[in-house]
Image (cartoon, rainbow, N blue to C red):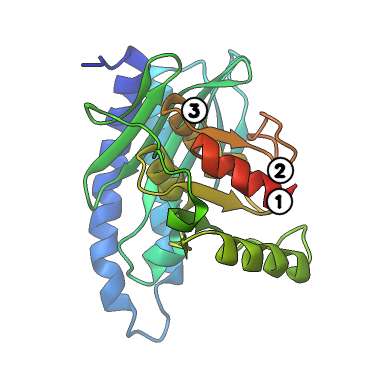
Amino acid sequence: MARYSPNMNVMMKAVEKASKHLVRDFGEVENLQISMKGPGDFVSAADKRSEQILQEELSYARPDFGFLMEEGGEIKGKDPSKRWIIDPLDGTANFINAIPHWCITMALEEEGQITAALTYDPLRDELFWAEKGVGAYMRHQRLRVSGKKEPKTAMIGVNDYLLGKSPEDYWQKMNTINHTFGKVKNFGSMGLDLAYVAAGRFDGHWAPAGHSAWDCAAGILLIRESGGYISDFANGADVLNSKEFIAGNPHIHEELRKIVK
């Protein structure tokens, strides 16, 4: 059984505290659907409150580390070699519409490398985590990517970001992916999609242009530590600084690479 490192214990404590507030707020969202104002402002406040809790907890435990966050941007730390990369609420559109599919993601970057990662789905109480050289797990269960080789049996997760790409290019590739693979799903949470690749639930993932580092930081390590491949469209390894990437088990990753290259 893998043991949590001190950094991972800090990360888990932080997300569990922040998630309690998000779960409570999510319970209020459905009631706001019928109001004239709608839930948008309420969810924005919940997102920021989650980020504040995470920042406070992590700063208390590791005061010298920096931050890269969806809401707060980059905050330099006394130790420039270490920073937390945080998405306090991944799947905001789902949250706003009372769809129970969203998560918190967090990663620790050291000397430009992701060394610890965590994705937490509090509604299902599924906590995916990985540490470099240790493996990827859901709590204490070891994760491995799927073994599927035949594209027609594979399920692929996709995102619908169009920034930086023409709609024609997006739909051309989407059409090819739809015809190549058995099932294609857009569930609205990149963080959970990537965790599902690591867990073998999805066989691959296609992320066209438009994502940020906090969208994929945790997923990078989860997938690599579970035996999967994740790369930019040119098959480069620096996914964190890329605006587009593909992921999957080795066979499905290669099939996706042929389509997007």
Mark 3 sits on what residue? 224
Query: Mark 1 is on which residue type?
Result: Val
Q: Residue 225: x percent and y percent?
A: 44, 25
Q: Is residue 247 visible?
A: no
Give the camera-side residue of 43 and 105.
105
Q: Earlier in the sequence, mark 1 or mark 3?
A: 3
Residue 29 location, quadrant? bottom left
Q: Earlier in the sequence, mark 3 or mark 2?
A: 3
Q: Residue at x 33, y 35 (%)?
A: 128
Alpha carbon separation for disc pair 1 and 3: 20 Å
Q: Which mark is residue 68?
A: none
Query: Mark 3 is on which residue type?
Result: Arg
Q: Which mark is residue 233?
A: 2
Query: Mark 2 is on which residue type?
Result: Phe
Q: Is residue 83 visible?
A: yes
Q: Earlier in the sequence, mark 1 or mark 2?
A: 2
Mark 1 sits on what residue? 260
Q: Residue 51: x percent and y percent?
A: 43, 43
Query: Is residue 41 toward the left or the right of residue 164 in the image?
Result: left
* Label 2 residue SS: loop
> Are circles 1 and 2 on residues that touch, CB within 8 Å?
yes
Disc 3 crowd rating (10 Å Cα; few below 14, some 14-19, many 20+) is: many
Give the camera-side residue of 132 and 181.
181
Q: Residue 48: x percent and y percent?
A: 45, 50
Alpha carbon separation for disc pair 3 and 2: 17 Å
Q: Residue at x 47, y 43 (%)?
A: 149
Query: Is residue 53 toward the left or the right of residue 110 in the image?
Result: left
* Label 1 residue SS: helix
Image height check: is 111 above or below 239? above
Camera-near label (1 vs 3) is 1
